[in-house]
Amino acid sequence: MTTTAVTDQTERALLARIPTGLYIDGRWTEAADGGRFEVVDPSTETVLATVADARPDDGDRALAAAHAAQPSWGRTPPRVRAEILRQAFELVTIRAEDFALTMTLEMGKPLAEAHAEVSYGAEFLRWFGEEATRISGRYSTAPDGANRLVVTRRPVGPCLLITPWNFPLAMATRKIAPAIAAGCTMVLKPAALTPLSALLLAEVLEDAGLPPGVLSVIPTTDPGSVSGPLLSDARLRKLSFTGSTPVGRRLIAASADQVLRVSMELGGNAPFIVFEDADLDAAVEGALAAKLRNGGEACVAANRFLVHRSLADEFGQALAARMSSVTVGRGTDPATRLGPLINAAAVARVGRLVDGAVAAGARLALGGRALDGPGHFFPPTVLTDVPAGADILDEEIFGPVASIVPFDTEDEAVRLANATPFGLVCYVYTRDLDRGLRMGERLETGMLGLNTGVVSNPAAPFGGVKQSGLGREGGREGIEEYLETCYIGVADPFAAFG
Ligand code: SIN
């Protein structure tokens, strides 16, 4: 891992190595109209690279390649698919410095966090490589004895994968790896804000032996006009999307025409509940992780800190003290613990939420004002006594702002936690195991962190309930999203046997 500041020369050398074309059918090409767009460093607001800007014709070419490759790829032995994924895991790991610096440059996260994402993202390749060889069906006798029931699994078919800017590598591998393992072909549309990591990943997957057409990568600044025709094209069979709930809702509607299989990892509004019997130091450490991982730009980021009234002041002071010591800066500086937000609009949004909370009566214990540029920096911020009705309790903050709300009883904590259309993750701190497990049943959530501020794990089913999404990514469940079930009824083989 890099421990010294990255030099301009290192950055330039890396940027010169990253492919910037579209990757379609195993070839690097320009966009249909030759257009390119700029990728900007959110720390400096300087241009890092220009990338080919896919048009609808490019989407069509990519889907045609996926459709043509599907039959042979779907029949490729699982062991071969597994070995490609394993090799990709090795290559991403060997090129960890490149991937980490790429993410730091295009997304802004500190290098140490970028390295953590490389490990996280690579692990999806290894995990699903292992899962590829464990796809299985079953054989049974019908209850009336007349037939045999053979249940088989097969790949869903060509997929459109749409990934966000906040985890440019891991969100791509979390979709690509199970698709490869299941035998699906795919078109990846990475976020236009952070396309470089996905393009580097395409190069690595090609080096790992992925055949042409199985994966195409088409960054675009016009997602609607590129994805729209693909969703209504009968050659496409599945959509997997990670992003906001409003966009997810529109994509689900657009998928209805073709009755596509959909997987949706959407927004969250995670409560972080600290009960009166919690280990306070552990809760503050967990809060830091749940709030500041990825600068708060994560759908699993703690959005509302619900703290028992007896601890609320102490918790708020301790959290503000820990957050005040966080160094803000460019991610390439090893001292940096908090990088910039992704763009100026994100800074404006977070500022509006903080101002709104203060206007509604919250007290500002730390931070609260965007830092001067260049770069889109917002400092660690703590708000206490945030009143019900403040927008900051209802909207996903996606920034380094902790809002603390006191509560008095377990029932009240549950009511506040569940008072949201989202249900991705909750965090609970308590020493009472019965209460912890009870919360697992009372909270409307897809995931629960019990005395931990980090739940993300490639071996676990990541996903939400309510308007936080459909389906699961990672774990044994992750590959299911890319498999169909086919049942074959077979006549009783003893019928003519006597
Ligand atoms: C996300 O924020 O979209 C994913 C976060 C994670 O995988 O931990």
Image: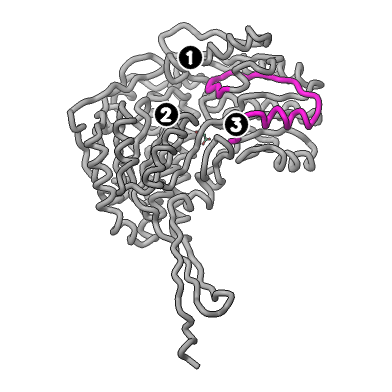
Q: Residue at x 73, y 32 (%)?
A: 414
Q: Is residue 494 above or below residue 353?
A: below
Q: Secondary structure at mark 2?
A: loop
The numbered disc on residue 208 is: none
For disc 1, the marked residue is 347
- Whether label 2 lies within 8 Å of ligand 1 gets the answer no
Q: Residues within 10 Å of mark 3 (few under 14, many from 20)?
A: some
Q: Amino acid at mark 2?
A: Trp
Q: Amino acid at mark 1?
A: Val
Select label 1 or label 3 by which is in front: 3
Is residue 156 rendered to the left or right of residue 303?
Answer: left
The numbered disc on residue 421 is: 3
Where is residue 114? Give x, y as percent: 46, 30
For disc 2, the marked residue is 165
Is label 2 in contact with label 3 (beta carbons under 8 Å)?
A: no
Where is residue 186? Give x, y as percent: 34, 46
Q: Secondary structure at mark 3?
A: loop
Quadrant for the N terminus, please.
top left
Magenta includes 412?
Answer: yes
Res. 318 visible in picture: yes
Q: Which quadrant of the figure has residue 345?
A: top left
Name of the residue lying farthest toward the bottom: 498
Magenta region: which residues? 395-424
